[in-house]
Image (cartoon, helix red, strand yellow):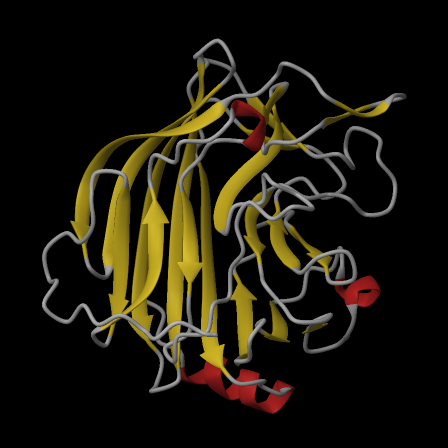
């Protein structure tokens, strides 16, 4: 059964504990942010959002699923950061395939800048297995209402090279895996009863949208136990592509290195901003366009 939404109207000051924060829209908790999850190194330890819910309380994220245990709700993660696996699971090795390696790093919270019921602002370090800092990140997460049946999640991240040199971001695809497996970036593991529908303004279905650079991408599904929902993703940066899976599992990723490596250049921070509309119901293209037109982007 879908859990009832939790009211947190009185929480105008930081909500939660040292390891978990709660995000609130219109007096209802819509997401939890796990800042210091206690995870096996092979699962890509990193802060992540889970559970994320619609305003009616329908869950729209999955975490630690049996098929890919390292899929953690909504998070930032990259499989190859200068050779460090900051995604979790096996590493794709050119000429060999997926291989278990001792190459796991961690994305670690290092301090808060601001922490309220609708805004989280903090600093992080992307570290390799030896603890060497590869990237420093400033991340801001905000939540805002979008009518009575929807809300916006806004996640902005600035990555800065911490090694004194360029830092390279790669994916299984850039390391030789065929089939459009260019994942790594802002990844959302959804939850669905049956295969969800994915579409852009011009195309529909996993094969048609995977690898595209459309301005927006929508996933519509029904959660186990009931509850229809739609997620509308925006925020591709220069060179980014959509990585999408629906048949094997429901997931959408703003892929930073879909078919060629990306670089966080020394002295030139990389800025990313990802916005997701979390809506109750199955929105059609006209409904999606109307929501996007009505959105106020600060």
Q: Position of residue 292 (x, y in %)?
A: 48, 79
280 relative to 67, above or below: below
47 relative to 216, above or below: above
Horizontal arrangement in the rendering, residue 91 relative to residue 118 (left or right):
right
Q: Position of residue 82 (x, y in %)?
A: 60, 20
Count the numbered circles shown.
Answer: 0
Residue located at (27% from left, 60% from top)? 23
80 relative to 286, above or below: above
Q: Position of residue 72 (x, y in %)?
A: 52, 46
Q: Position of residue 163 (x, y in %)?
A: 46, 14
Residue located at (69% from left, 46% from top)? 67
Q: Nearer the viewer, residue 30 or 141?
A: 30
Residue located at (43% from left, 12% from top)? 131
Q: Nearer the viewer, residue 244 or 70?
A: 70
Farthest top residue in view: 130
Q: Nearer the viewer, residue 87 or 165?
A: 87
Q: Quadrant of residue 230?
A: bottom right
237 relative to 294, above or below: above
Quadrant containing the C terminus in the rendered view: bottom left
Q: Quadrant of residue 27?
A: bottom left
Residue located at (67% from left, 60% from top)? 250
Horizontal arrangement in the rendering, residue 178 relative to residue 166 (left or right):
right
Horizontal arrangement in the rendering, residue 118 relative to residue 63 (left or right):
left
């Amino acid at each position: 059964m879908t859990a009832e939404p939790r009211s947190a109207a009185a929480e105008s000051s930081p909500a939660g504990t040292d390891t978990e924060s709660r995000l609130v829209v219109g007096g209802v908790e819509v997401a939890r942010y796990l800042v210091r999850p206690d995870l096996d190194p092979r699962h890509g330890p990193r802060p992540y959002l889970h559970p994320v819910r619609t305003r009616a309380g329908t869950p729209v994220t999955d975490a630690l699923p049996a098929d890919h245990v390292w899929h953690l709700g909504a998070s930032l993660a990259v499989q190859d950061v200068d050779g460090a696996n900051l995604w979790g699971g096996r590493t794709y090795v050119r000429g060999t395939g997926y291989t278990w390696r001792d190459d796991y790093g961690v994305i670690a919270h290092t301090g808060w800048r601001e922490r309220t019921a609708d805004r989280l602002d903090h600093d992080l370090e992307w570290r390799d297995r030896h603890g060497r800092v590869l990237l420093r990140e400033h991340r801001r997460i905000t939540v805002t209402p979008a009518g009575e049946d929807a809300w916006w999640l806004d996640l902005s991240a600035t990555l800065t090279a911490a090694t004194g040199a360029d830092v390279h971001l790669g994916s299984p695809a850039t390391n030789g895996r065929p089939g459009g497996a260019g994942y790594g970036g802002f990844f959302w593991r959804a939850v669905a009863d049956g295969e969800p529908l994915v579409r852009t303004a011009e195309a529909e279905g996993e094969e048609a949208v995977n690898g595209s650079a459309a301005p927006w991408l929508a996933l519509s599904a029904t959660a186990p136990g009931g509850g229809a929902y739609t997620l509308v993703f925006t925020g591709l940066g220069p060179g980014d592509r959509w990585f999408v899976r629906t048949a094997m599992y429901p997931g959408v990723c703003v892929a930073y290195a879909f078919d060629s490596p990306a670089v966080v250049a020394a002295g030139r921070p990389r800025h990313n901003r990802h916005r997701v509309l979390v809506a109750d119901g199955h929105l059609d293209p006209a409904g999606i366009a109307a929501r996007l037109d009505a959105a106020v982007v600060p």
